[in-house]
Image (cartoon, rainbow, N blue to C red):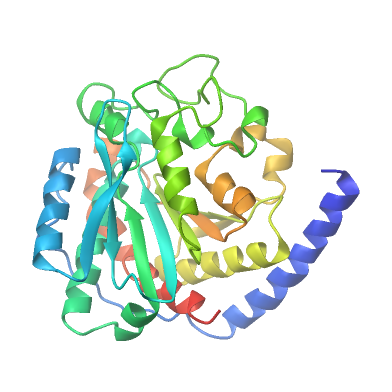
Amino acid sequence: MKMGSLLRKRIGKTAAVLVLMAALLLQPAAAVRGASLPSIVQLSSTYTYDEMIMDIAELTAMYPGIVTSGSIGTSVQGRNIPFVVLGNPAAPHSIMIQSSIHAREYIVSQSTMATIEYYAMQFAAGNLADVLATTCFYIVPMANPDGVTMAQSVAPDWKANANGVDLNRNFPVGWELTSGAAAPGPQKFKGFTPASEPETRALMAFASARNYSCYISYHQQGNIIYYDDDLTSPVTSALSTALAATVNGINRYAMVNTTGTNATNTTTYGGFGDYVLMGLQKPGITVECGSAYGARGQSQCSTIFLKNADTWAAAARLFAQY
């Protein structure tokens, strides 16, 4: 994109963002407070792929009509990559959530599963009726199951999939601009071709299968909310900013605007967020939870869950207005 065109786009985005931010600042984020710890999903010790599969089965059995599940595809090593549908699929709005695209950041799979249980309990009890009526959540709680298994067993700092490809650099949007490692390994290798990995292709298909209102991607670490991008439309930019502000109003993570970053730091291209924001032109945020990843961050899992659980309802209420 030429500099003049990019500048005009940024000016347009800035105006839209200022209007929406002003509206947000005038009212507190709406959310149900006080999530309690789950009874099925444990938060105290390492949460494996097999444990997640068992918990999904138990939740679907316990909450029929509220929790259903399926598979978005299979990993390099043949593991099913599960998705969970939480709520009423006939609801007019939908939100996609994915966690643990980076292997060593597997604690967010655990907190995501706990959040699924929390909302299932609330919906079954007749609470959050407005959220249930307006929004259905489509959740991929562990996008990189092979990598997670490796990180939990033999390579604690591993971020990539079983092929040594960093899935969050393997998406086709800006892939050709992405730098990093030159060969397969634990992190930063973008793959030999864009969307070369089955996990990447499965996420792309799932992300584009519905007209989602927004996307939330969970990572570790930093207590940060990344939002916006260089090449999004003014509307997408404004809605991403509104989503970030809404989530920040609950978890109090720092908001970091990535506009301008991608123009000078090409390593940020090729990610799931780039695919959503620039490829699909849909609002989305990346939430970096906690201050440590893997086993070093296990003690923070309950806190991560409690700080973020109510953000899903808040996001649903935000987009129910549109």
In the rendered view, tell whether residue 139 sits above or below residue 81. Answer: below
- Numbered circles on residues, count: 0
- Residue at the top extreme, as displayed: 183
Quarter location, residue 198:
top left
Q: Residue at x 22, y 61 (%)?
A: 68
In the rendered view, tell whether residue 44 sits above or below residue 78. Answer: below
Q: Residue at x 20, y 26 (%)?
A: 153
Q: Where is residue 229 shown, x and y percent of the image?
A: 65, 51
Q: Residue at x 17, y 78 (%)?
A: 124
Q: Where is residue 117 shown, x and y percent of the image?
A: 19, 64
Q: Is the N terminus in the top left, top right, bottom left or bottom right quadrant?
A: top right
Q: Where is residue 90 shown, x and y percent of the image?
A: 35, 74
In this view of the protein, can residue 42 be seen by the observer?
A: no
Q: Is the C terminus in the top left, top right, bottom left or bottom right quadrant?
A: bottom right
Is 226 situated left or right of 129 in this image? right
In the rendered view, tell whether residue 82 sits above or below residue 253. Answer: above
In the rendered view, tell whether residue 226 sits above or below residue 221. Answer: below
- Residue at the right extreme, as displayed: 4
Q: Where is residue 43 shown, x and y percent of the image?
A: 17, 52
Closer to us: 276 or 206? 206
Is 77 situated left or right of 3 in this image? left
Is 298 situated left or right of 7 in this image? left
In this view of the protein, can residue 149 be seen by the observer?
A: yes
Closer to us: 291 or 311? 311
Is 249 situated left or right of 152 in this image? right
